[in-house]
Image: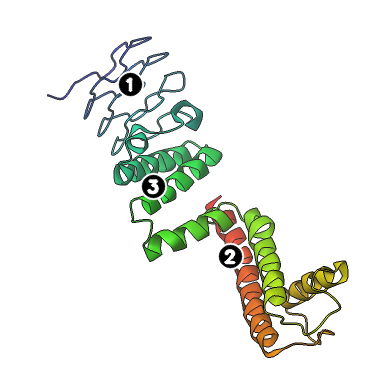
Amino acid sequence: MVAHLESANLTGAHLEGANLNGAHLQDADLAVAHLQGANLGDANLQGVDLYQTHLEGVYIADARLHVTRLRRQQIKQVGEEKDRNYEDARRAYLGLKVNFREIGYYDDARWAYLKERRMERKSHPWHSPYWLLSWIEDIFTGYDEKPQWIMSRLFPTIWLLFALLYWAGQGLGPVESYLSLRGVHTYLLFSLRAMVTLENSPFPLTEVGLWLSAFEGALGIIAFGLLGFSVAKRIARD
């Protein structure tokens, strides 16, 4: 049976864990109501002001949100995610993302978008190619919502990883000592030059070094392109 609670006065009501699936709550007064862990799946919440409502762990997949006033700090984590029902959690965060954009809460919309993408990843096996590629996209770009992560995470990872590979593979030829301070600086400097594709390297290269520098240069070009793409995408979304 569907609950019809249109325009009902539910101020301060304790509805923790209540099953309000499909309920009609348009214009209901839910100020300071306690809805922690309640099931609001498929409920009609269009135009409802939930700004002062307690919503921690609420189930909200497929709820009809339209200009519904609430903030992400009230939810923290939807019940579907807590139950590890990641497909339903993805739909819950999708609805929240769209609603936050409608009411102009763009930071909250970005949070919901990140949660939506992470729930989508978790709905796949961790050993699948999709999960791995999605995880890499998340930690290095924040799904294009964190372009600064490319500068603070991706570029340093490429730089330091290849410096280590040049040392391990003896890609630069002989130096006085692989453990010397001079040797460390040499590998770091060459890796930086290769990443930004500087020509006319003053360092001698072995065959291994030639292959590594070509691969690092290609990754550097891709990373710079990804940075521009992420910034443009973020601007377009805003």
Residue at mark 1: 27
Q: Amino acid at mark 1?
A: Asp
Residue at mark 3: 119
The answer to whether 198 is drawn above or below residue 151 in the figure is: below
Label 3 crowd (10 A; few <14 / some 14-19 / many >=20): many
Residue 5, numbered label: none
The quarter of the displayed image where residue 179 is located: bottom right
The foreground one among 152 and 143 is 152
Q: Amino acid at mark 2?
A: Phe
Please indicate whether residue 23 sits to the left or right of residue 157 in the image: left
Give the residue drawn at x 73%, y 79%.
197
Distance from label 3 to label 2 (Cα)?
A: 23 Å
**Element marked by disc 3:** helix
For marks 1 and 3, the one nearer the N-term is 1
Give the residue drawn at x 62%, y 69%.
223
The answer to whether 69 is drawn above or below residue 218 in the figure is: above
Q: Position of residue 159 (x, y in %)?
A: 70, 67
For marks 3 and 2, the one nearer the N-term is 3
The answer to whether 31 is drawn above or below residue 80 in the figure is: above
**Element marked by disc 2:** helix
Residue at mark 2: 229
The foreground one among 143 and 201 is 201
Distance from label 1 to label 3 (Cα)?
A: 31 Å
The foreground one among 105 and 14 is 14
Q: Position of residue 209 (x, y in %)?
A: 69, 84
